[in-house]
Image: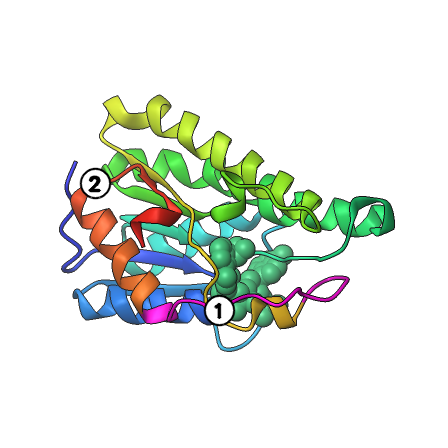
Amino acid sequence: MARNLDAAVVAVVGTGGLGRALTEALAGRGATVLVAGRSGPVDVRLDLTDVAAGGALVSHALAHHGRLDGVVIAAGVVAFGELEATDDAVIEELLLTNALGPLWLARHVLPTLRQSRGFLVNLSGVVAATPLPGLAAYSASKAAAAAGFQALAREVRRAGVLVCDVQPPHTETGLATRPLAGTAPRFGAGLDPRTVAERIVAGIEAGETIIAASDF
Ligand SMILES: NC(=O)c1ccc[n+]([C@@H]2O[C@H](COP(=O)([O-])OP(=O)(O)OC[C@H]3O[C@@H](n4cnc5c(N)ncnc54)[C@H](OP(=O)(O)O)[C@@H]3O)[C@@H](O)[C@H]2O)c1
């Protein structure tokens, strides 16, 4: 299920380091990119924790472009610290944003992606496959999203829709400096977001359903 991105209409959810790099990489392939997020200059203002987010994305795309060929979810939150020291509300926001939000959004964009035989990508993370102490709730949220999107890939494959779970390793976007709670441990130098974005876009073009941390 290889994909040609030239002239495709693609929504990128998330205006952070990876969202911006993905927007540039997709535009570089000739795609029309709709930027969606909760802050900054966006084409579609939405919050991933709102079940209405997917519907808003579809309405905008169809009203302004008449089609929607792809959605890339590059939005999420992190928190550091052992689980016993993590507030209940922080755990809830991690699961709501990183797991429930992408699954809700998927439900609401898939009918339109079935029509275009399009693609849906979610960035989980390396912790989905390799959960880490000090990141128990974040790891749980990403593992939940990864499992959901990997199963979903098989649900829609026959309809010609590509679903891809992406598990990037640590990337230098500043995410770790903006946690909901706690302080990041010392990570080694992370990847350049542009390198990560180019690898994800190549994976979409090639029709990959999982891009593991070791693929970067
Ligand atoms: N950087 C890494 O090392 C790494 C590794 C693996 C996976 N990831 C994943 O990649 C994704 C993008 O991360 P990043 O590195 O680009 O981080 P980032 O630069 O901090 O960007 C995160 C983005 O998510 C948005 N966001 C958070 N909660 C949201 C919500 N409820 N609704 C809509 N947007 C929301 C943020 O919006 P605001 O600006 O309004 O806060 C921001 O645009 C995340 O899911 C992250 O877990 C990152």
Vertical placement of residue 134 versus 39, above or below: above
Residue at 51%, 67% (x, y): give it.
188
Which stretch did the figure color magenta?
179-194
Callout in the foreground (1, 2): 2
Q: Secondary structure at mark 1?
A: loop
Ligand 1 under 8 Å from disc 1 Cβ: yes
**Where is mark 1, residue-wise?**
15
Q: Position of residue 41 (x, y in %)?
A: 49, 77
**Where is mark 2, residue-wise?**
207
Residue 38, visible in the rendered structure = no
**Mark 1: few/some/many CA within 10 Å (<14, 14-19, 20+):** many
Judged from the image, the quadrant occupied by ligand 1 is: bottom right
On the rendered image, what quadrant is the N terminus found in? top left
**Mark 2: few/some/many CA within 10 Å (<14, 14-19, 20+):** some
Q: Position of residue 96 (x, y in %)?
A: 67, 44
Measured Cα–Cα span from mark 1 to mark 2: 24 Å
Label whose residue precedes the other's in the sequence (1 or 2): 1
Vertical placement of residue 28 versus 128, above or below: below
Residue 58, visible in the rendered structure = yes
Callout 2, which amino acid? Gly
On the rendered image, what quadrant is the C terminus found in? bottom left
Of 63 and 213, nearer the camera is 213
